[in-house]
Amino acid sequence: MIPINSTQSALEALDHEDAGVRYHGAWWLGKHRAIEAIPKLVDCLKDEREVTSTGGYPLRRQAARSLGMIKDASCIHSLLETLNTNDVQLHEATLRALIEIKNDQCSHALISYLDKDIDNKPIEALIEALASNQVWQVAEKIKPFLQSDCERVVSSAAAFFYECTGEKSYLDQVIALLNHENRFVRQSAAFDLARIGTISAAKSILAAPIPNNVKMYAIRAILSDSLLKSAKGENEQGAQNQEAHDSLFKTLDGLTRENFAGNLLINQDITKPTSTEQSLRSTADILSLAFEKLGSPSLMEREEGIRLLAESPKSIKEDLHNLYFSESDQDIKMGLVKAMATLKNSDYVPALIDAVGVEIGNHCQGNIRRVAACALGDIDWIQQADCPSLTITMDKLSWTLQYPDDWGLRYSACIALEGIGNSRARALLLESSAKEADPVILKRIDIALSEISSPNIF
């Protein structure tokens, strides 16, 4: 695999003889919102070098997804042409891209696609695209999908009609699916509510048996929609909305700090300490049991593993950062980060900095970054004002606040800088507020600044 670490290397990868390299190049360009890559990605929509046994084109699909990430309307005509191919998975990728781009140029083509008789047509994505582009004139054609055998299609159809009519019965229909026995249906309903953006659905989302990452995504989307409406003066009951915003930001803070479960919905049955745990004597025994619990499918077991580490003998506490660097299991590394966050010792800074800096390879690593960033802000820097460690921490948080695509990581940097509360933290927040485009991050910066009215000097 050739290294792909710049726009130029990713563009060159699209011409590589290896299909995997071409695919990775297309993904990289989308992830990094490389607008100059649009012509090459458009060419990839017609690439026939790699085809699956079922007649699909993986590179075409990824090119469509990447164009959706870049969100430039210049590629809409090329995307719409892919709806004439026989690859329905490419159709879905294109529809998802059109949802992101949101441009009225595609309304006629979407209606035409709705009318076509196509096997395995991605109806859920199509309905979402029609709603995203406010193509309400097809309401009568969408109505039968409210009775679909597929609950995810029912959810998207009900969301369509709520956005179209504002009738609460449709909203209630989507909310009811948050408690469906199938976890994929529950998560799909949460994403539909996120797309609707109504703040009245927030409590139901937070109470639903869905993963924390999905809750974070949905609450962020709802807050973003509500904040934008408030900025335009479209929100009524300003004081009530402000109270709701304050509550949701506190909730989002908690999800960011405690996001141990990640994308997994983990059994939360409470377990009592066993006689084996109560009789532990040696350091090796304590670590063995703690690591066993950190790898458990039970969230409560994992929390118990963190407690064991945080309340362990001094020799273990002093070695937590070394254990972090010697461990490869992501669940255990997360538990070690959580234990270090609990103990709030500046000796752990190198490990926490490393955790913030890892490249996102999966959901767990993404969560580690956020939790570790928050932990950097929880250290009692006034009592442990080690200048080199603090300087390194501030440099890392400066990067974390300004550069990553991961909004949750930037959000965690706001929390950390608020916790540090010194003059440099305030300066970094002020600098970022002039550049940040995300309304949720921007508001969280304002909240942090309001809490650092008199910055600590250390």
Image: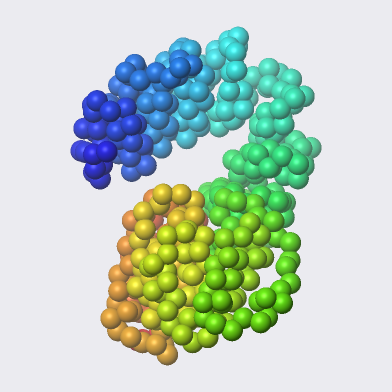
- Identify the image quadrant of the C terminus: bottom left
In the image, 232 versus 427, the foreground residue is 427
Which residue is located at x 60 percent, y 66 percent?
293
**Total numbered circles:** 0
In the image, 279 versus 189, the foreground residue is 279
Q: Looking at the picture, how far across and down is residue 235, in whole percent?
A: 62, 50
Q: Is residue 27 left or right of residue 240?
A: left
Its colouring scheme is rainbow
Residue at the top extreme, as displayed: 117
Q: Looking at the picture, how far across and down is residue 448, in whole percent?
A: 47, 70
Which residue is located at x 57 percent, y 60 percent?
295
Q: Which quadrant would residue 192 be assigned to in this image?
A: top right
Q: Looking at the picture, how far across and down is residue 84, in whole percent?
A: 46, 12
In the image, 51 versus 246, the foreground residue is 51
Say if 234 sits above or below 303 in the image: above
Residue at the bottom extreme, as displayed: 383
Q: Which quadrant would residue 309 be assigned to in this image?
A: bottom right
**Can residue 313 be seen from the camera position used here?**
yes
Which residue is located at x 47 percent, y 59 percent?
329
Say if 275 sits above or below 370 in the image: below
**Can residue 427 be seen from the camera position used here?**
no
- Identify the image quadrant of the N terminus: top left
Which residue is located at x 36 percent, y 87 percent?
385
Q: Which quadrant would residue 291 be assigned to in this image?
A: bottom right
In the image, 125 versus 49, the foreground residue is 49
Q: Looking at the picture, how far across and down is residue 188, in whole percent?
A: 64, 39
Say if 390 sits above or below 368 in the image: below
